[in-house]
Amino acid sequence: MERILEKIKDIVVGGRFREIEAQLEEAIQGGVDLHSLINQAMIAAMDVVGDRFAKGKIFVPEMLVSAKTMEMGLEILQPLLKEDESLSRGSVLLCTVKGDVHDIGKNLVGMMLEGAGFRVTDLGVDQTVETVLEKIDEIRPDILGLSALLTTTMPEMQKVIEELNAHGLRDRVSVMIGGAPISAKFARHIGADAYGKDAAEAVAIARSLTASQ
C-alpha cells in the first residue's frame, strides 16, 4: 500500500494529471483506504507543493497543475466519499470577501476540505456581507471560511463577523480566515476562531473546529 500511496503522491506533486485516474482506480480496486488516499497521498502531496511554492522552488503555474491533478483525483473519489458517511466531517461555507477577486488559495482550500470529507459550498469571489449572512442562515454551515489577498479588503472580514454578531448568527458558526496578508494576530483582533496559513493547515483547523462542536 505504501508504494501505491507514494506513487499517487508523486503524480500529484508532479502535476501528471493524465496518470491520476488510472492510478487511483488501481488503488481503489486494491482496497486502499480512502482516508489514506486522501491524507497520506493527496493532501501530503499538496503539503509538498505548498512548501516548494513558499520557498520559491516552484511558481503559480506548477502549483496550479498540481492542484488540478488533485481536483481530478477528488472527482474520482467524491462518489465514494458520499457513500461513506463515516468520512463526513461537517459543512463549510467558503468565499473571498467583497472587493477581492482572488481565488487560487480559496479554491485549493475547498478542494482539500472536500478531499478530507467536508461538504463544501463555495460562494466564489467578491461576496458582500449580506450574501454571506443569507447563505449562512440558509444552509447552517459548521464553519465559515473567509479569504482575502488584498490588504484593502481585510476589513471586510471584520464586517462579516460584526454582522454575524448583530444578527445573532455568530454562535452558530465557527469562522476561520486566510490569505497572504492575514495573520493569527489579525484573526484574534477581529474575533475569528482561527487563522490558516495554508490549505493543509485549514483542513487541520476545520477538523479541530468540528470536533469541538
Image: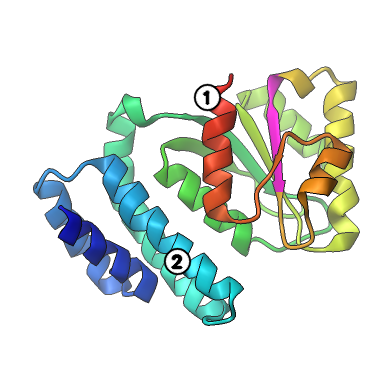
The kind of secondary structure element at disc 1 is helix
From the image, give the main secondary structure of the stretch colored magenta. Answer: strand
Of 199 and 166, nearer the camera is 199
Write down the region rendered in magenta: 172-177
The residue at the point 82 percent across, 39 percent down is: 188
| 81 with respect to 152 (left or right) | left
The residue at the point 83 percent across, 34 percent down is: 191
User: Can residue 3 be seen?
Assistant: yes
| 130 with respect to 31 (left or right) | right
User: Can residue 75 be seen?
Assistant: no
Amino acid type, residue under disc 1 in the picture = Ala
> Considering the image in quadrants, where does the C terminus appear?
top right
| 139 with respect to 181 (left or right) | left
The residue at the point 56 percent across, 74 percent down is: 53
Task: Report, in whole angstroms, how far the alpha carbon at label 2 lies from the one at label 1.
Answer: 26 Å
Of 39 and 15, nearer the camera is 39
**Mark 2, residue position:** 48
**Mark 1, residue position:** 211
Amino acid type, residue under disc 2 in the picture = Val
Q: Position of residue 184 (x, y in %)?
A: 76, 47
Q: Position of residue 108 (x, y in %)?
A: 53, 57
